[in-house]
Amino acid sequence: MILEQTEQSSPHLPEIHMVRHARAKRLKLAVSAQGIRLTVPPNATKRQVQDFLVHSQSWLEQTWLKQQLLISQKAEQSTQIELPTTLDLNFFPKTIRVEYQSMSRAFKWSENDALLFINADHAEKALTQFVFQFAKQVLPEPLNYFAKVHQRKVNTVRISKAKTRWGSCSSDQRIMLHAGLLLMPLESAEYVILHELAHTVHMHHQTSFWQQLEQWCPQAKLKQKRLKQYRLPHWWQV
């Protein structure tokens, strides 16, 4: 593979990175946020490359413009993200005051003052990281409380921040809870915990499971419906 650079084919376009590839069978253009890439077969002549670019110029300009508009829109959306100045987290009794400043670490937390300093340069990522780390400390407590109340055994608790699910329970009583439980309505967070705890009795979603869950969490089906409507804050990053 040989990487070259062609001249700009248009004043509206960046330089096109040309890559001669031994396996390439035809000239091929690819447009991305990083630039324009032209894959060239090993035997293609300079004239063939130039003719191809001339014929592709209109498509290239339109595609590049769309790409740049998309980038601008995303950047605008990013600057419009409203970052929280306070956090009310489930299972923590105080309202957390949030301040943003330049700093080397992601965040600095003072539990006594309920004060959180966030790295202003990477605010969304730092906020997510704080909630994730905080959830590791806080979420096992309500799970263990409900397990004790309902006389169930939980072997291990794992905290996740992936978007795939709010919780899970394995056949050997290993429970996973999403860090976002700290951010959703308290009723929904407790529902998720009790839902996974009910799986230590029934490893399915058949009638017996819902009957068990209803004993521990009245109106379980309604709470399940409300949970499906919840979305993590716009600043949440995985």
Image (spheres, rainbow, N blue to C red):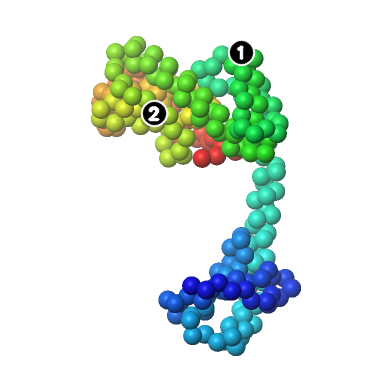
Q: Which residue is mark 2?
A: 158
Residue furthest top as drawn: 149
Instruction: Say which residue appears at 61% left-offset and 13% top-offset.
Output: 112
- Residue type, numbered disc 2: Arg
Picture quadrant of residue 209: top left
Earlier along the polypeptide chain: callout 2 or callout 1?
Answer: 1
Q: Where 236 falls versus 89 (above or below)? A: below
- Give the percent coordinates (x, y) of residue 226: 47, 30
Q: Where 30 falls versus 215 (above or below)? A: below
Instruction: Say which residue appears at 55% left-offset and 87% top-offset.
Output: 45
- Residue type, numbered disc 1: Asn
Mark 1 surroundings: few (<14), some (14-19) or many (≥20) residues within 10 A: few
Quick check: 187 left or right of 87?
left
The answer to whether residue 62 is seen in the rendering is no
- Give the percent coordinates (x, y) of residue 60: 63, 73
Residue furthest right as drawn: 11
- Give the percent coordinates (x, y) of residue 123: 64, 36
